[in-house]
């Protein structure tokens, strides 16, 4: 096999879903031995490409060659392996059973010392876990089991779709180490991610996909998070970087305030004499690094931190203990927003106690069930009814339940910490949609975020939090693109002021 045909070569790939063009003539080459990063906004066609390569959907026109051979459904799922964000394995089967599930009869056996796959499995850290039910193991091990499954089928192409969005930093590092190893062993590795810095660091080249086409492949010295961000926003090259200077118009009045913190001081002194208001009809983001105080200010908005000062809702002072009646809070950590031993339905209505409960345990069953079903539909929670355990849902759907429950309580304000952390892309888009609808209906949303793309996608205005202090509000619409916003935020985080526009 000559090197110019090795790998994956996609030419003129087109795919429509009804009237929607998902892929509009995608050209892409992924070479063995490299990690090809793939960036693109929601709806760009990335998942469609992955599904086509994995043999899950058919394409309309175009050509895909794998090592010079036309892609065919016969080899699709063996040679091309997709490691999903939420693994698609069987939690009640053991690691060993999951590795071979679907082709137990092919005579393959769990590797022993000296066997072909022994070192690989050792590397993946699953050798000793053969008989452990997968459901008892963390997401990182589940993911490595999926990798093992692909490796024993001798997959040539490994596709990772947001692989580390739900992993801890240590697990992420380990993941990237393995991904490099797969590439070094001559496989084609494709990595789809919204985390631009990681794409820049770990990919050999980064393909930017927009509107169903590859608009640019970034490599060499250009391969930086900034260039990727800029390409994403402009859809082309970097020559116009000078235009991207932030144009910041502060002090714009946005709507009347629903929630106001007036000279509020945290009893632990994480912030002092803080004035902050959350306007009706808008999504307001607090963005700051860990330790900036942003998370604590958000919690103070929900009455969850001990503070001195005045908090008003719709102009009236409200005691801290009462704030929860006006502000619904959703934690970043789903485990603390949801009751893991309760059903989807119970989680959806747990906050509606005044409307449907008689005391904490006396939920009116029928009313509860119909409300829960309404919420499930309205918020597109993908679950098999409302009676199943919350834990059986994907992370994204669990988060939708947490947010639906908060919205269902009809608060004046929604206060959310990192609402889409560890959530798959389609749920992410749906969550943003839920928040946009909530403010369109007259509510107010305040978020604590750590990621610029999230702010750029969902917020109307933001404050940068630095050392317990807030910047002036910046209107997201005033920024030409995400990169300009990122620059302004970075400048505020380091200098406490925005560099003036050139
Ligand atoms: P990405 O993964 O980059 O977010 P997708 O491949 O999911 O993008 O989507 C590309 C476009 O195709 C979007 O407009 C999306 O709404 C549409 N699309 C994807 N899957 C389907 C489907 N099963 N039915 C209808 N439209 C779809």
Image (spheres, helix red, strand yellow):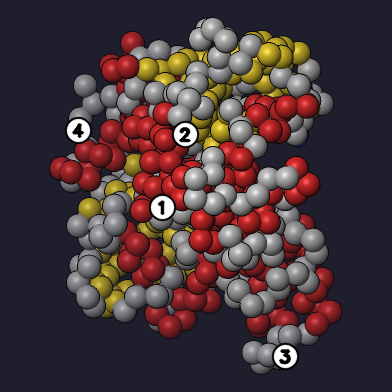
Which label's residue is closer to the chain start, 4 or 2?
2
Tell me which label, 1 or 2, sits earlier in the chain.
1
> Residue 150's quadrant in the figure?
top right
Vertical relation: 68 (above or below) 325: above
Nearer mark to the viewer, of 1 and 4: 1
How far, Cα to Cα, is label 1 from label 4? Answer: 37 Å
Q: Which residue is mark 2?
A: 182
In the image, is 255 to the left or to the right of 370?
A: left
What is the quadrant of the N terminus in the image?
Answer: top right
**Which residue shows up at 24% across the image and 72% down it?**
265
In depth, the one of 30 and 471 nearer the eye is: 30
Tag in front: 3 or 1: 1
| Residue farthest toward the left in the current orientation of the protein | 495
Q: Determine the CA span between mark 1 and mark 2.
A: 16 Å
Q: Is mark 1 within 8 Å of ligand 1?
A: no
Could you tell whether 3 is left or right of 385 in the image?
left
Q: Which residue is the site of mark 1?
A: 171
Instruction: Quote the CA–CA distance across marks 4 and 2.
Output: 43 Å
Q: Quadrant of residue 470?
A: bottom left
User: Picture coordinates of residue 380 (x, y %)?
Assistant: 72, 53
Q: Label 3, on which residue?
A: 362
Mark in front: 4 vs 2: 2
């Amino acid at each position: 096999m000559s090197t110019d045909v090795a790998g994956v070569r996609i030419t003129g790939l087109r795919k429509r879903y009804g009237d929607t063009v998902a892929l509009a003539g995608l050209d892409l080459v992924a070479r063995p031995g490299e990690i090809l990063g793939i960036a693109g906004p929601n709806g760009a066609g990335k998942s469609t490409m992955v599904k086509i390569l994995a043999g899950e959907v058919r394409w309309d026109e175009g050509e895909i060659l794998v090592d010079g051979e036309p892609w065919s459904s016969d080899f699709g799922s063996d040679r091309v392996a997709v490691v999903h964000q939420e693994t698609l394995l069987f939690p009640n089967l053991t690691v060993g059973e999951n590795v071979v599930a679907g082709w137990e009869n092919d005579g393959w056996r769990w590797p022993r010392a000296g066997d072909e796959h022994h070192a690989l499995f050792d590397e993946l850290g699953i050798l000793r876990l053969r008989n452990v039910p997968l459901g008892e193991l963390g997401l990182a091990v589940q993911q490595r089991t999926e990798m093992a499954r692909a490796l024993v089928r001798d997959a040539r192409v490994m596709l990772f779709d947001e692989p580390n969005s739900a992993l801890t930093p240590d697990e992420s590092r380990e993941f990237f180490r393995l991904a490099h190893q797969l590439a070094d062993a001559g496989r084609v590795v494709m990595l789809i991610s919204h985390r631009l810095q990681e794409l820049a660091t770990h990919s050999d080249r980064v393909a930017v996909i927009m509107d169903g086409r590859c608009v640019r492949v970034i490599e060499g010295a250009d391969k930086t998070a900034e260039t990727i961000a800029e390409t994403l926003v402009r859809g082309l090259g970097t020559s116009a970087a000078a235009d991207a200077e932030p144009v910041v118009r502060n002090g714009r009045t946005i709507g009347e305030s629903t929630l106001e913190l007036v000279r509020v001081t945290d009893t632990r002194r994480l912030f002092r004499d803080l004035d902050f208001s959350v306007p009706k009809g808008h999504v307001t983001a607090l963005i700051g690094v860990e330790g900036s105080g942003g998370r604590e200010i958000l919690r103070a908005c929900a009455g969850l931190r001990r503070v001195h000062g005045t908090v008003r809702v719709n102009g009236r002072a409200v005691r801290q203990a009462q704030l929860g009646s006006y502000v619904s809070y959703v934690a970043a950590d789903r485990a603390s927003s949801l009751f893991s031993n309760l059903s989807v339905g119970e989680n959806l209505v747990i906050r509606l106690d005044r409307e449907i409960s008689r005391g904490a345990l006396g939920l009116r069953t029928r009313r509860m069930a119909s409300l829960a079903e309404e919420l499930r539909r309205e918020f597109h929670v993908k679950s098999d009814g409302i009676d199943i355990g919350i834990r059986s849902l994907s992370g994204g759907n669990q988060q939708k339940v947490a947010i639906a429950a908060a919205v269902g309580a009809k608060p004046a304000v929604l206060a959310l910490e990192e609402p889409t952390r560890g959530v798959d892309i389609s749920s992410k888009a749906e969550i943003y949609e839920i928040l946009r609808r909530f403010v369109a209906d007259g509510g107010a949303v305040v978020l604590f975020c750590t990621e610029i793309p999230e702010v750029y996608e969902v917020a109307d205005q933001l404050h940068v939090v630095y050392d317990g202090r807030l910047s002036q509000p910046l209107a997201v619409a005033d920024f030409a693109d995400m990169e300009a916003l990122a620059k302004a935020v970075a400048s505020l985080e380091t200098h406490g002021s925005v560099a003036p526009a050139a």
